Image (cartoon, rainbow, N blue to C red):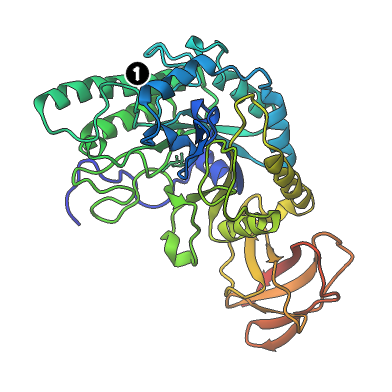
Amino acid sequence: EISLQHGAHRLGRRNDADMARWRAYGLGQFIHWGLYSIPGGEWNGKIYNGAAEWIRTWKEVSPQAYDSLIYRFNPIKFNPDSWAAVAGRMGVKYVTITTKHHDGFCLWPSKYTNFTVAHSPYKKDIIGPLVKAYNKQGIDVILYFSIMDWHNPDWRYDIKTRDDSIAFNRFKQFTRNQLLELLTRYPTAKGLWFDGTWDNSWVKQAAFADSLETEMRKLRPGLIIGSRFRADEYGKRHFDSNGNLMGDYEQGWERKIPEKIEDVHGNDWDCVMTIPENQWGYAKTWSGHIKTADELLEMLAKCVSLDGNFVLNFGPKPDGTLRTEEQTLAKAIGDWMTVNKEAIYNGEYAGFAKQDWGYFIKNTGTNKTYMVIFNVPVSGLLRVTTPLHTVINKAYDLGNLTQTYTPEEIGTSTYFIHLHQQTPKKPFVIVLETGETG
Ligand SMILES: C#C[C@@H]1N[C@@H](C)[C@@H](O)[C@H]1O
């Protein structure tokens, strides 16, 4: 171990109630919305083949022309209650919303820049009504904030000269002011999801970022901040120079999911996932593989089975409505969650050997372990190997409690569950009630 001033300040998981609440969420929604939603991945009739929210960096787009989109931001159909209703119906427990993405446009009327909704035709705050609407649905809010800010003239990708340093010091104060402003304006926000923190300029700010994180936690006790916010004094991100996790949960699982429990090193984590391969902001044309509800449900079950949360991204349209494909997926996921939500909420790693048919999820604090089944074997036999000294007392369908199973013991701690029907149309869940022997 080397001595670190600005590495991880806590070893192991947070064990407070705020983090336990975050850990229990299971399913989240990401919202990417801003000026980039207006071009929707197209510019002068040409399709940008990158992620739509990065279109400002395209050589075909002049930054000034992009920034002038502020004069076209007027989502007349924006109704936060309808977004929150869709999320509530989908079974989402928390939403992460972009307050400011890399382009620097603020969805709240920040005092520290004019590049905000207040200077657009829309004029009104977007974040406040969104927080209120989601909280009314019982959904917690996490605020996404990009440190990298392409619009701010003091932003630098690296600090090479004295002028860079003077400008970036102004930028650091601007960033601190905006973050304290967000925490003060939206006191019910449970956490911050930082992004745009990979450039050398910010990576060199270990002391400043560490002190800012401490200040934010003091201002908002219980605040949840992930591993992507700051680097240690050697520039190490997510895990410090001693291999310890920075922040309260690992934020490295962007569009990817761990394969096995060893990959998560006993940490809390979230996976943020797009429906197309890589589009976060609204893209008029979705190309490539568009994930189906069953694929997304399997990703959700896999994340929860490995102690993580699954956060599905939505990119609302410039007029403030949600695109049809996203509404359709939200309903399909919601229909499944209506029947099976107890397998997802308060879910954790069960410690059963992984099987091909699907995922085991233990319900925190109870004797229930859920088998979330996606791949029914032609034999109709579901193999279950329990942890040592764990026995199965009862087994039954979560969707039909009268449908019970008598596990056939076929070896030490190993059983077959004989399925009664083998052609399910949707993923389904069998509940195991377990006990401990000797
Ligand atoms: C790269 C990158 C960003 N990180 C994702 C969460 C999106 O915000 C994307 O633009």
Relative image position of residue 144 (x, y in whole percent)? 47, 33
Residue 318 in which image quadrant = top right
Comparing 414 with 377, the one in front is: 377
- In the rendered image, is residue 322 in sight? yes
Which quadrant contains ligand 1? top left
Q: In which quarter of the image is the N terminus?
A: bottom left
Q: Which residue is drawn at 40% across and 28% down?
A: 103
Relative to 5, residue 242 above or below: below
Comparing 195 with 372, the one in front is: 195
Q: Residue at x 20, y 35 (%)?
A: 158
* Residue position marked by numbered label 1 in the rendering: 177
Relative image position of residue 215 (x, y in whole percent)? 33, 26
Residue that extends furthest to the right in the rendered view of this protein? 402
Q: Looking at numbered disc 1 in the image, what kind of residue is underneath it?
A: Asn
Residue that extends furthest to the front in the rendered view of this protein? 45
Residue 148 in which image quadrant = top left
- Position of 421 with respect to 162 (left or right) is right
